[in-house]
Image: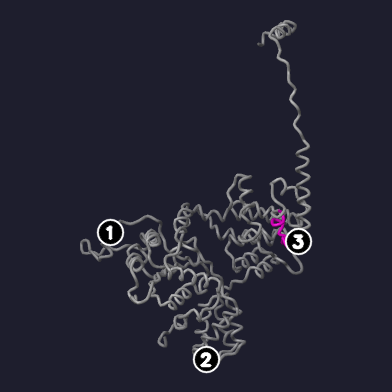
Amino acid sequence: MGGVSDWTERHRPVSELQLEGNEVQRRQIRKWLDEWQAGTPNKKALLLVGPPGVGKTSIARAIAADMGWSVIELNASDARNAAAIRKAATHGSTHRSLFHNPNEKAQRTLILLDEVDHLSGGLREVSQERLQKAMMGEEVAGKAITFSGDSGGKAELLRLLDSTQQPVIMACNDEMGLWGKGSSWRSTKDRFSRHLQKINFVRASDEALRRIARRVLRAENIEFEDAAIEELVKSNPGDLRALVRDLQVVCVNKELTLTKDNVNLLIEAGQRDISIEVFPGLDNLYRSKTAEEASTISRSIDKSPNDLMNWVHWNNASLFTDNNGVIRGARSLSQANKMFYGRFLNTAHRSSYWCSNLSALSASVANPEPLVGRIFASYPNYLRRGGSYTRPNIVDRLASTCGINKSTVREEMLPILSVLMDSEEKIGDATDFTISLSLGFTAEEHASLAGLPLSRASTKKLISQYNESHSLLLAKSEEIQPLPQIEKEPVQQEEVKEVIKEKDPGQTKLF
């Protein structure tokens, strides 16, 4: 390790004890690897999704090292066509580790594929005969048989997940890069999802960054000021790799003590784009007064364009005090939604760009009355997939009643219903049971949609009122009896003839 010039490699964690951040995600990885230790889990692969530099591959390697497993790794800088993946990964996945100890049970080889979102091409398989010749190094007319680029790589990766006898971990920044952005992306996602479990990584906390910085500096025997660490953390968006690189740059001269002034010189020399958390980011966005300012702020918020659109859509109705501003914002968000779905149709629209910018305009210049005081943005309830309002019976009833799929219910119907039933919203009223009664909801389901804790005394009172209203509605429906049918005596044919004779002869010509 002493000869490694790159500090990110020199100080890469070699054990789980040295890892920082994403504790929940680490437990999920450890649990999955323990399942491999005991046998074969239902999902043979993990897909680690998250921003760069948060330690996705480092965590996987460190945990595997603690378990005594060997690792086969491929990344974007390696050839990742069908031949390369089958030679390096598939062979390792279908055989025991080369370093297998026969006295140990279930020693594994971890197959680690980094940056799979850069794996281009579709799921079309290459010629198996040509693939075998390429792996054997055969030549045709004096030229070796090779595959260019990522030819057949994605199809071979899918085959690997289907046949592997060893754990496979894939890492990426944007999972859509793996599914593809053409019209067949859903089919590709479904085929991969059968084999893998997805784990979402988040940026490291400030405290984790401080611990990493101190550990690296002490390992390098460099004196430092706490104020210098604070400046580094303040300028870092939660990227562990970037933090270590910054430390290496600013500590070129190891004879000097790392000071706040040294760090500020680095920051002034080359400030990187900094991502800010969503709540302070929205506070800045809703205060912006120009389109240019709003666009700049939206790009710094640590949310994808689609997520930002959802956050703005949820908060506009509660934050805007002008109804015209809400309407203008909704129109802009409608256009943003159309632009976002352009990415799945592979059109010429720059979907992410327009989605992000239109969402920013919806939260800023669309409102004619500037917001004053502290801005209390809230987390969109319909994005909380584990919330009580998303219980399956509510979603199932709405999907069945309206004849739509469950995803549409969660994304489009539940947000509207929750606002209409939430008394904290300007247009909401939890005591209005009209909609819930018409949809056949129970009292508990109505309370859940209104965002009320079932254990609260006021909620129990509301449930009692709802049940009374429901009983009255049933009583009224029972009181309304259908009108009795009046039995008509059969009309004799002779009587019909007499009536026809009495009518004007001119009318009979019509029959």
Q: Secondary structure at mark 1?
A: helix
Residue 369: assigned label: 3
Q: Is residue 370 left or right of residue 136?
A: right
Q: Do the CB atoms of the residues marked 2 and 3 lie less than 8 Å apart?
A: no
Asked where in the image residue 231 lies, by quadrant, the reply is bottom right
Q: Amino acid at mark 1?
A: Arg
Q: Along the line of sight, which residue is nearer the eye, 322 or 295?
A: 322
Identify the amino acid type marked 3: Glu
Q: Say whether residue 429 is visible.
A: no
Which segment did they paint magenta? Answer: 446-459
Alpha carbons under labels 2 and 3: distance apart:
53 Å
Residue 215 on the magenta span: no
For the point 71% across and 67% down, the residue is 287
In the image, is 114 to the left or to the right of 205?
Answer: left
- Of the image marks 2 and 1, the number of the one nearer the N terminus: 1
Point out the frontmost of discs 2 and 3. 2
Q: SS for tag 2?
A: loop
Tell me the distance, in whole angstroms, between the alpha carbons under discs 1 and 3: 67 Å
Instruction: Read off the residue under disc 1.
Output: 130
Amino acid type, callout 2: Ile
Residue under label 2: 222
Q: Residues within 10 Å of mark 3 (few under 14, many from 20)?
A: few
Q: Which mark is residue 166?
A: none
